[in-house]
Image (tube, helix red, strand yellow):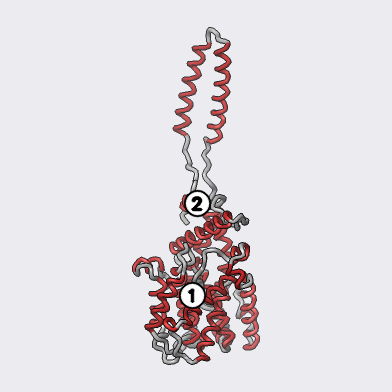
């Protein structure tokens, strides 16, 4: 559960079975497989993980690596909460084993079957998925349905020994959490949890300064944090809201990972964007912003990542880090942001001799025309002058070649990406 966890390295060590090994290890380490209330069948759980991993599509980004990574991040956030608010209970803030298992399950399966193109593409191209889910959180509905359809099959139903009521709760929690990952409702969710926190604060008599960071406090050191979080999680509704926050943070957590891992994820998501842009071009659809590989450049890619961190990642993570002291998250996000801001500010190196060479070419063309006219009207001094001009031209050309520094054009998107070392 370390935050330096590298899912790519795990995939190499496990013959490309990252979701299977991450999922099993998390359930085992968290005591979920032996929990008497859950009655999970560990053998069937293994079979489920195999099937779930195979149900992921081999996309550049939305694949089983991402599923395993998000589940691990969610488990780490739970551990951070436990360390921030220690108690004798197995899980922090009154979370039950059923709720925790649903959270990790949702992390593993939240993008299962992802086709490699987003909701906007599904709707614009009227795919069967868009038709099935009426253009409403198309992929999120699909992922939840796929995961629970697999789980329903007897050979994969590791929760079958739980009471029926518990199975219904498990299903409900999984659906709610996966649907919450739809970024179309991102701001709406942030507003919802902010209102809930204020409501909880009023109930326990906390002032606004005790629940809202003003920039002076260290992250996670707000005086009312523990009381506020305990009040929030007194109800099943409040715990579900916090689980949604955890899963949403985990889903977009790669900017909070070490920079090397974050940059690798950025390469993958950018390539998946370009592949969607290629599909849109083939179908005659407008190419979505940031997905046209022909128009992309390193600075534009960097600016896109700056916007993603500033407007999507930071507002969400601040809800978590303001109450749970997790300095590595904030530090890594700041580092990622600075990296992309620096990359976005870079200007393409311009060859200072380019204009000079163009002017010289024009002069040479003009001289050729003049020389052609001179041939028609020869003069006694034309030969020596021509020889003198040729010598000057050769000398000037050699000097230009010596002084000029050629900058190769970036013909492919990979070359453009490598140019800023994403």
Percent x, y for residue 155? 42, 82
* Quadrant (top left/top right/bottom left/bottom right) for the N terminus: bottom left
**Near-viewer residue (223 or 69):** 69
Percent x, y for residue 355? 56, 34
Q: Secondary structure at mark 2?
A: helix
Q: Is residue 88 visible?
A: no
* Label 2 vs label 1, nearer the camera: 1
317 with respect to 54 (left or right): right
**Near-viewer residue (73 or 49):** 49
The crowd level at tag 2 (other Cα within 10 Å; few <14, some 14-19, many 20+) is some
Q: Pointer 1: what residue?
A: 109
Q: Pointer 2: what residue?
A: 413
In the image, what residue occupies the spot 64% across and 72% down?
134
| Distance (Cα) linking label 2 and label 1 | 31 Å
Q: Quadrant of residue 35?
A: bottom left
Q: Is residue 327 visible?
A: yes
197 with respect to 102 (left or right): right
Q: Which mark is residue 95?
A: none
**In this view, 408 is above or below 297:** above
Q: How many marks?
A: 2
Percent x, y for residue 235? 58, 88
**In this view, 112 is above or below 268:** below
**Near-viewer residue (387 or 215):** 387
Q: In terms of sequence position, does the residue under pointer 2 or pointer 1 come before the other?
A: 1
**In this view, 106 is above or below 355:** below
- Contact? badges 2 and 1 (CB < 8 Å): no
Q: Secondary structure at mark 1?
A: helix
In the image, what residue occupies the spot 44% across and 69% down?
64
139 with respect to 260 (left or right): right
The crowd level at tag 1 (other Cα within 10 Å; few <14, some 14-19, many 20+) is many
In the image, what residue occupies the spot 60% across and 69% down?
130
Percent x, y for residue 324? 52, 78
């Amino acid at each position: 559960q370390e935050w330096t966890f590298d899912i790519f390295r795990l995939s190499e060590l496990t013959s490309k079975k990252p979701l299977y090994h991450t999922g099993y290890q998390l359930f085992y380490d968290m005591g979920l497989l032996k929990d008497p209330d859950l009655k999970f069948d560990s053998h069937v759980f293994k079979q489920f993980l195999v099937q779930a991993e195979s149900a992921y599509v081999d996309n550049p980004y939305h694949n089983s690596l991402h599923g395993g990574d998000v589940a691990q991040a969610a488990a780490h956030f739970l551990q951070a909460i436990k360390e921030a608010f220690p108690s004798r209970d197995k899980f922090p803030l009154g979370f039950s084993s059923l709720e925790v298992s649903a959270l990790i399950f949702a992390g593993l399966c939240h993008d299962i079957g992802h086709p490699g193109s987003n909701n906007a593409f599904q709707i614009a191209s009227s795919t069967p998925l868009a038709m099935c889910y009426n253009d409403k959180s198309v992929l999120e509905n699909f992922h939840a349905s796929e995961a629970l359809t697999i789980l329903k099959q007897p050979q994969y139903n590791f929760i079958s020994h739980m009471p029926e009521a518990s199975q219904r709760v498990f299903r409900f929690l999984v659906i709610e959490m996966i649907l919450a990952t739809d970024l179309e409702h991102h701001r709406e969710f942030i507003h919802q949890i902010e209102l809930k926190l204020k409501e909880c604060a009023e109930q326990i008599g906390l002032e606004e300064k005790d629940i809202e960071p003003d920039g002076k406090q260290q992250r996670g050191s707000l005086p009312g944090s523990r009381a506020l979080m305990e009040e929030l999680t007194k109800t099943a509704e409040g715990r579900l809201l916090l689980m949604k926050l955890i899963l949403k943070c985990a889903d977009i957590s790669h900017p909070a990972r070490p920079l090397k891992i974050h940059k690798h994820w950025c390469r993958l998501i950018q390539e998946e964007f370009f592949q969607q842009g290629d599909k849109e071009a083939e179908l005659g659809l407008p190419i979505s912003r940031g997905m046209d590989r022909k128009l992309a450049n390193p600075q534009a890619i960097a600016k896109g990542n700056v916007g993603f961190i500033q407007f999507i990642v930071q507002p969400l993570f601040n809800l978590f880090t303001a109450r749970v002291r997790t300095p590595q998250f904030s530090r890594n996000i700041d580092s990622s942001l600075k990296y992309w801001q620096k990359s976005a500010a870079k200007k393409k190196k311009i060859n200072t001799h380019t204009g000079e060479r163009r002017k010289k070419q024009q002069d040479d063309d003009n001289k050729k025309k003049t020389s052609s006219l001179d041939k028609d009207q020869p003069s006694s001094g034309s030969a020596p002058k021509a020889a003198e001009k040729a010598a000057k031209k050769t000398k000037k050309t050699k000097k230009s070649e010596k002084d000029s520094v050629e900058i190769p054009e970036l013909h492919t998107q990979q070359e453009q990406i490598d140019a800023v070392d994403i």
